[in-house]
Amino acid sequence: MLDKLLLGRYLQGDSFVHQLDPRTKFISTFVFIIIIFLANNWLTYLILAIFTLVALLASKIPMKFFWNGVKPLLWVILFTVVLQMLFTTGGDVYFEWGFIKVTSFGVINAVYIFLRFVLIIFISTLMTLTTPPLQIADAMESIMKPLGKIGVPVHEIALMLSIALRFVPTLMDEAQKIMNAQRARGVDFGEGNLFEQMKAIIPILIPLFVSSFNRAEDLATAMEARGYQGGTGRTKYRVLTYGKKDGVTALTLVVLTIALVVFRGQ
């Protein structure tokens, strides 16, 4: 179960997407999340779907990984889609029972919401799988650098993010070991009602929190012993540079935005 979690996971490769600067991927992901709300008809969503499919194919990553990114949120997506379908009025009425109505506008909006969720998750998963966690932290620090002039602790925020992402796989491995140990003692995590399943998770969380605090204390002691003084005057091993492929990606996003604006009224 935990081995399918994609947070902090990186798949090494040499594709077009892998070679992009992490700042380009980070900014492009947020721009995509913003411009997806420009889509309001079948044509604009088709354009977004084609763009997403081309991006996924350019990464040369099997589609099962992107489907694994959708599965944990599938019930949330379906719940939102059902609410949208039942409580959006307008158009032809297909079904009516009390205050609940299923209308043509509701069905269309539900499909749009579903597509919006799936496309956003696909693009976000693409960025996660093609960018090492430490590069994501470096990209955030570089993008947020202007905020340092107004007193925002940019380096400290990036450091916390990089440490958190660095230890996500380690914590997942520890959680899996604890679950296996609990199963060996006869604990079934999928048995009983919701309350009993939540109660069964407590024996996992307590040792996991204890080991996390111990690891954080050891890390703080090690950094202090090495004379860590923050980001002032420090050089970087990983130097971020923009290339031609980043320019192509930016131009593609501009063209995509213009296409959505032009065709959204069609």
Image: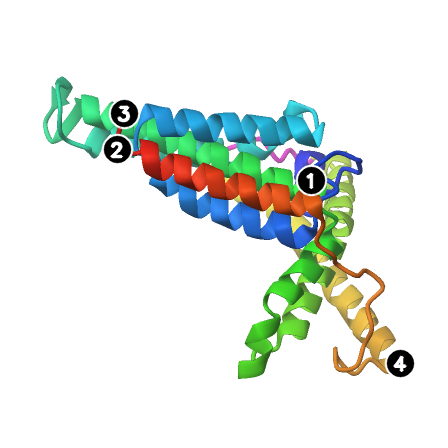
Q: Measured from the top left, where is residue 245 in percent x and y?
A: 68, 42
Closer to the eye: label 4 or 1 = 1
Circle 1 crowding by C-alpha within 10 Å: few under 14, some 14–19, many from 20: many
Q: Is residue 231 visible?
A: yes
Which span of residues is magenta-colored? Answer: 187-192
Q: Earlier in the sequence, mark 1 or mark 3?
A: 3
Closer to the eye: label 4 or 3 = 3
Circle 1 sits on which residue?
Answer: 129
Circle 4 sits on which residue?
Answer: 225
Q: Secondary structure at mark 3?
A: helix
Circle 2 sits on which residue?
Answer: 265
Circle 3 sits on which residue?
Answer: 108
Q: Earlier in the sequence, mark 2 or mark 1?
A: 1
Circle 2 crowding by C-alpha within 10 Å: few under 14, some 14–19, many from 20: few
Q: Secondary structure at mark 1?
A: helix
Q: Measured from the top left, where is residue 27 in percent x and y?
A: 56, 52
Amino acid at the residue labelled 4: Ala
Q: Earlier in the sequence, mark 4 or mark 3?
A: 3
